[in-house]
């Protein structure tokens, strides 16, 4: 959507696809949908068509023109692996990421089976690039935990989990071959509460497995009031590959 982002774990967003459809409880209060639908029918606005899925080919090459290295969240307003996005288009997006290798890309999906399959096949050329991080959303046990298995089985240099909005205690999470975990509560109107003990359990498991832990926010109706301190401090850890990738430019 824009070169700059207020999302705590990224610098910029890039949306070669806009719009999406819901797949699981984590989508219930999708911020992208709320934002997009506000502009439905507004002539000339990027979200004139609301949250209807739309490819945006004119945005594909944008990172090539951003000279300063950035951490880029790919498709903050969609899901790159939505079934209405053709394989060819996804491959073109991956091609740009491979070419513009001075950036770090964060790809996050709830369509983990398709991502995993493509990383083994059509996207294999991009799977193990150090500057491309492949991630899945994990909001609960039923829908979220199976996505981790899909991710683990895919070839990738860096795999990450976005555990947001965390909706219940995940229990024991297999963190083998996982390189980064972000945790956050839901924010905005009707936000579902997140309990401290669910967060602490994930932090402990990350510590036990040496996995960097990023605590994004408590969330709630007024997220700025709830803040992002956990036991009096912030957790902004990142995968070790970030410094490696930045040193290469
Ligand atoms: S997958 Fe992501 S972008 Fe798509 S509806 Fe769900 S939360 Fe929104």
Image (cartoon, rainbow, N blue to C red):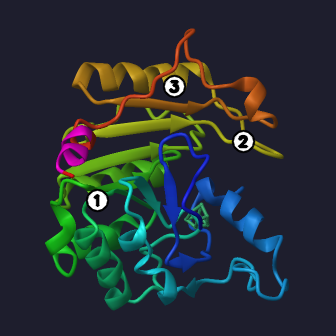
Q: Residue at x 75, y 79 (%)?
A: 50
User: Along the polypeptide, which appears first: circle 2 or circle 3?
Assistant: 2
Secondary structure at numbered mark 3: helix
Secondary structure at numbered mark 1: helix
Figure check: 208 above or below 43: above
Point out residue 189 in the picture as x, y percentages from the top left corner: 83, 46
Secondary structure at numbered mark 2: loop
The reply to whether the residue tagged 3 has its Cβ within 8 angstroms of ligand 1 is no
Residue 244 part of the magenta-drawn span: yes
Residue 199, label in figure: 3
Magenta highlight range:
243-248
Q: CA distance from mark 2 to mark 3?
A: 16 Å
Q: Which residue is mark 2?
A: 187
Q: Which residue is mark 1?
A: 150
Figure check: 118 above or below 171: below
Point out residue 164 in the picture as x, y percentages from the top left corner: 55, 44
Q: CA distance from mark 3 to mark 1?
A: 23 Å
Q: Is residue 34 left or right of residue 91?
A: right
Q: CA distance from mark 1 to mark 2?
A: 27 Å
Point out residue 170 in the picture as x, y percentages from the top left corner: 46, 35
Quadrant of the image where one finds ligand 1: bottom right
Q: Nearer the viewer, residue 96 or 179?
A: 96
The reply to whether the residue tagged 2 has its Cβ within 8 angstroms of ligand 1 is no
Q: Is residue 199 left or right of residue 108?
A: right
Point out residue 23 in the picture as x, y percentages from the top left corner: 56, 67
Q: Quadrant of residue 52?
A: bottom right
Q: Residue at x 59, y 77 (%)?
A: 18
């Amino acid at each position: 959507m824009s070169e700059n982002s207020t999302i705590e774990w990224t610098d910029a967003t890039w949306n070669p696809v806009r719009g999406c459809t819901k797949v699981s409880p984590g989508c219930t209060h999708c911020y992208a949908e709320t934002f997009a639908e506000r502009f439905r029918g507004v002539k000339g606005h990027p979200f004139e068509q609301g949250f209807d899925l739309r490819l945006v080919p004119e945005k594909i090459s944008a990172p090539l023109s951003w000279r300063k290295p950035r951490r880029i969240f790919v498709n903050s307003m969609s899901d790159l692996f939505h079934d209405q996005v053709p394989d060819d288009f996804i491959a073109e997006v991956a091609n740009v990421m491979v070419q513009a290798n001075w950036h770090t890309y964060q790809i996050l999906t709830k369509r983990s089976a398709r991502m995993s399959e493509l990383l083994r096949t059509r996207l294999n050329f991009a799977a193990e690039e150090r500057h491309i991080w492949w991630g899945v959303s994990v909001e609960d046990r039923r829908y979220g935990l199976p996505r981790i298995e899909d991710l683990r089985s895919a070839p990738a240099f860096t795999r990450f989990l976005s555990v947001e909005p965390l909706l219940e205690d995940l229990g024991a999470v297999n963190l083998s071959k996982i390189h980064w975990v972000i945790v956050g509560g839901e924010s905005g109107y009707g936000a579902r509460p997140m309990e401290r003990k669910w967060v602490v359990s994930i932090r402990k498991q990350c510590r036990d497995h040496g996995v960097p832990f990023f605590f994004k926010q408590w969330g709630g109706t007024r997220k700025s009031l709830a803040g992002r301190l956990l036991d009096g401090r912030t957790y902004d850890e990142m995968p070790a590959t970030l410094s490696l990738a930045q040193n290469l430019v």
